[in-house]
Amino acid sequence: MEKTRKFYTVKFRNWGADSAGTAWFDNKEDADKFYNSRDYVDPPKLHQARSTDTIAKYEEYCKR
């Protein structure tokens, strides 16, 4: 049975940027801290990954 991992994204806007950015987190606490520290952000969104490939991809996003 594959393990399920939770990841979170927060979409944000930087002043003067043409498009929104997305920050990835591997825990809710860090996602909430980021959300609460900025203006022009959407609330954290939960992503559940089950396959090892998806988990590896999301972990890589969190390192950026």
Image: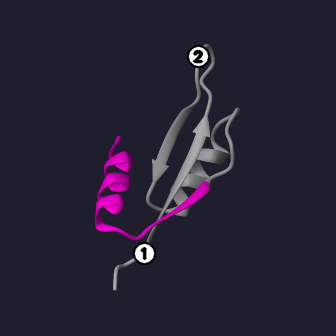
Magenta segment: 45-64
Disc marking residue 4: 1
Disc marking residue 47: none
Residue shown at 35% from the left, 59% from the top: 54
Find residue 11 and report its image quarter.
top right
Tell me the distance, in whole angstroms, between the alpha carbons under discs 2 and 1: 35 Å
Q: Position of residue 13 (x, y in %)?
A: 62, 28
Q: Is residue 62 magenta?
A: yes
Residue shown at 59% from the left, 24% from the top: 14
How packed mark 1 is, by other alpha carbons closer than 10 Å (few <14, some 14-19, many 20 or more), is: few
Q: Position of residue 19 (x, y in %)?
A: 58, 23
Going by the image, does 27 lie left or right of 46?
Answer: left
Query: What secondary structure is marked by label 1?
Result: loop
Find residue 52 and report its image quarter.
bottom left
Residue shown at 63% from the left, 41% from the top: 37
* Whether residue 33 is situated above or below residue 17 in the rendered picture: below
Closest to the observer, 20 or 28: 20
**Residue type of the residue flagged with mark 1:** Thr
Query: What secondary structure is marked by label 2?
Result: loop
How packed mark 2 is, by other alpha carbons closer than 10 Å (few <14, some 14-19, many 20 or more), is: few
Prevailing secondary structure class for the magenta stretch in the rendered image: helix
Going by the image, does 14 lie left or right of 55?
Answer: right
**Quadrant showing the C terminus:** top left
**Residue found farthest to the top:** 16
* Whether residue 64 is situated above or below residue 27 in the rendered picture: above
Going by the image, does 27 lie left or right of 35?
Answer: left
Q: Is residue 26 magenta?
A: no
**Residue found farthest to the bottom:** 1
Q: Which residue is mark 2?
A: 18
